Image: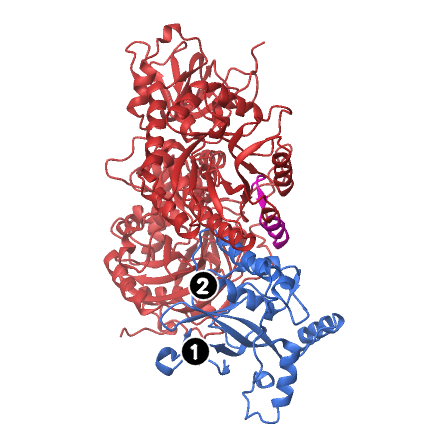
Chain colours: A red, B blue
Amino acid sequence: MPIWRRYSDCVEPMKVYVSGLYSGGNPQPGVGIVRSLRQAYPKAELVGVEYSNRVSGIHWNDLDDLWIQRPWDELDLDSYGARVRAALDAGGFWISGSDLEAMWLAALFPDGHDHLLAPPMGALRRITKPAVEAASGLPVKIPTYVSTDHSDWDLHAFCREHNWRVWLKGPYYDAARTPSWDVFEAVRNALSKVWSTERLYLQAHVSGYEESVMLSAYKGELLGAVSMRKREITPEGKTWAGDISEVPDEFMVPLRQMVKELQWTGGGELEMVRDAAGQAWLLEMNPRFPAWVHGSTIAGHNLPALLVQAASGVRAVPAPAQGQEFTRVVLEVPVRPEYPLPPIPEPFAGAIGHSLKHPSGLTSLAKKLHNANPEMLEVVSEEGGPTGLPTIPDTFVDDIESYDFDAVETPQFLFMDSTAAGLFKRAGERSHRLSTNEVQVVSGYSIKTNPDERLIRLALENGFLAEAISLLEVHKALEVGFKPDQVILNGPGKWWPEGMMPKERMHAVFCDSVADLDRTVGAIERGEMSSAHVGVRIRTPNVVSRFGIPLDSPATFRELVAAVKRLPADTAFGVHFHMASSNIGVAQWWHLFESMLKWCRSIEKLSGRTIDILDMGGGWFPDDWHADDDSKFAKAVETIRAMLPNVRQIVSEPGKAMAQPSMALAMRILEIQEHEDDKVEAVVDASIAELPMYFFYPHRMLRKCSETGQLQPLGRGKTHLMGRLCMEHDIVAANVQLPEGTRAGDLLIFCDAGGYDRSMSYVFGRG
Amino acid sequence: MYLDAAEKLDEVRAEERPKAPSAGARWQHFPYSCLLHHGDTCCEIAREWVIANDFAQLNGSDLLSGPRWLRQKYEWGPSPWPMHWCDVVERKVIDCGAHSALAHEVFTARGVTAFRAQFIQSYTADALSQWRTKWVDDKVSDHWIGDDVIYHEGNALLVGEDELKLWDSSAGWWINPRQNGGYGSLAAVRIFADGQWGGGDGFRWGERRIKPNEWTQI
């Protein structure tokens, strides 16, 4: 038990420098630290350190003095470092309230300093997010993450795998949800620009309640720790109110060990989310006290005081607990006359106000630190490291190399012969493997994904059914060789164009509304159409879609049940469920599948009609469909059999998974324009008229070397590929790297363009 | 049993009642609310819809997540009893008894262990007065409003061997086991459950133990 001195026994007044006084919507802890220290050391001299007089915390009246520096972008770090050293040598203590300043101080004092109350560099390296390697002994998990060094193709796969519930995070601060590819690209560009690095990471979202553990330690000894649950949260996700409790033993014991191993000094915060099952997920560990630090003092745990007490040997005035819960309020305080409010910068034309974010120039400090030591702050280090280049399947290369590009006018879609044949063959074989004596599994080819006759013929040859959304598509299928009883008709436009409805019996008709169902039944009774199965498309709740019969109210569900009851007894009944898994994510698609089966079971039970045919799928990204082994699909068939034992046929419709890889788009570079900062704009003869899906997913791109003929994949870089159209948004690829030696006239090939790129391409700018 | 009838029962039994706990005394023998079923497809469609919709709303989340969608779809307020399944799903506003009954149904359908729960909660005289006016205006019994507390219904969810979480279904949140007193706090709780839980000590809720089928003062 240490023997503390009383403050009155000290010869010199204690001086504590506290930084991180920003007190905006995303506050730093400086003011909270100052309030706690004032309570513990009423006579101590508290000096506020800041790098901008725009930071409102400098006006807090507990501060005895201010040390206002010029912003980090102006600051000479060497001379400032010398002054900090002198302040510490003179007996002052320093508590950093800023992650980046703590990193800079750790670099400035590689051997530490008794009065620097911030963690050493070795500890900082081991808490680098997102892995937070030092926390491996704690009872927490780390949410799955991936570095943005990976290719766009791989990053898109990560987002799909995690249902687009992902965060793109900066190396030091900042995080944004990226629910779609275009948002991801925009946020990536913004964060890369702000933090001067491409080294960002994507992390899976964890739903749950947010909580933190705050700690205080000196030279590897844990002085105290508290647990805080957020009870009110700002729109930015920051704590507004919380409750404080003791850290449970199962966390405290390994935490103490971690602090010892890291030789931690200073404050720290472990930010976590606790899921519904009670598992804690660690989001990050901050090398400083959190902004809610004084909330803990209110609850009787003054951790900054424990830190100063341990470092100075001077006893802190005990903090009586005023309650276990705290909340924030908004306070107006007088501005110090020696630091009057600075003028507001002139608003840019059309802009509203100006941002208070990073007024001290933290982003400049990040840049300086990064330049000084690029390895210091690697956010994600992976052995071998990703190349950033997409993997190009061998069949793509074979198919592309089979073309004589001297004879190819660009832009031109290239049919990927062996790729397409392989995809259809494998899908057909999978369906065959999954079929049993009780239930037949058959693939469906969605004609709208690409109505190219070669693809429709491959579908026919591999045992697919043809899925049409209009009578024109029905006739296209029949022209290629499908029989009417191999055709499924669905969608709201199934009656268009008038007069083209086949009289022969089709395989199935699925209706998009109760009115559509009644109309279909009427047409069958009048002999105007015929179908072996008649069914409905259902729209499960909680999914944004304009298709199918909604089930989001008891009334619509009741109407559906009544309509199904009205079906003629001699007509086999079916249900159709389609949702683009590439949009909602793979795991969520499987949840929807299970949800759909539950609805089907209820429909069977309530209507008395059994379901004979189930048509499911839609919008699968090719890799998710083809790369998976049979196990998930086999399990799905088993589940269907268990829940709907009367189903005799399952139509599995992969959507664009068949068409998308089956074509590529060849284009030529028309002109290369070089700009400042290594930025390049290359104009190509293709455009968004040929690549309308550019905004929705990345395409794997190749350059054909004009000298060697070699196909070279394109990675990330500073080149924008501008389309030929005089349209502002005609940019077919942003931030790519053209291989050295690329020049006008060179050939580029965009793979993965055979789905909606092809079928929704339009004629534009061709005269 | 529905609330009006229960209120009468409570009155009848008041004389025989042993010394009641301080909070909840008025509702010592009060049963929890139950939805009625017409025994026909009208109620069965409603029930199936609630269960299937709950799974859809889960959206892949953990089965132990609270069904907050019920509170989002059905506001909390006065509702007349008795109430059938086919009535309850069509209403825009339902009371805590109906909320709790619906939540219990979906928890059970998910396959998790859930129990009906009764709460006594502390509120201010102003709040009680507001509610009394509202219930009286709607010509619905205000028996649930006491002098300084209210009777409320919710759910208890088993999340460990004998550990519980208490779900306030008409608020859409889990009741905080660390709170002690104050506006909206839990003054007493009764959980309806069979069996010897916690080796006879009852369920664990935070730092407390709650014996089933009897009022526990918080």
In the picture, the disc for residue A399 is: none
Quadrant in the picture for residue A606: bottom right
Q: Quadrant of residue B39?
A: bottom right
Q: Give the residue number, with chain letter if any, for mark 1.
A: B194
Residue at (54% x, 58% y) in the render: B48
In the image, A41: left or right of A634?
right
Is A707 placed above or below B140 here? above
Q: Which residues are magenta?
A: A545-562
The reply to whether residue A72 is in sight is: no
Q: Are marks 2 and 1 on the same chain?
A: no
SS for dot 1: loop
Which residue sits at x=30%, y=67%?
A: A250
Chain letter for mark 1, please.
B
* Kind of residue at badge 1: Asp
Host chain of mark 2: A
Task: Work out whether residue B127 or residue B110 is closer to the camera in this orientation and state it.
Answer: B110
Query: What crowding class fits label 2: few (fewer than 14 Cα within 10 Å), some (14-19), or many (20 or more)?
Result: many
Report whether residue A285 is seen.
yes
**To which residue does mark 2 refer?**
A229
Q: Residue at x 62, y 85 (%)?
A: B10
Disc 2/disc 1 C-alpha distance (Å): 33 Å
Residue A319 at x, y percent in the picture: 43, 73
Amino acid type for the residue under numbered disc 2: Arg
Q: Is residue A537 left or right of residue B75?
A: left
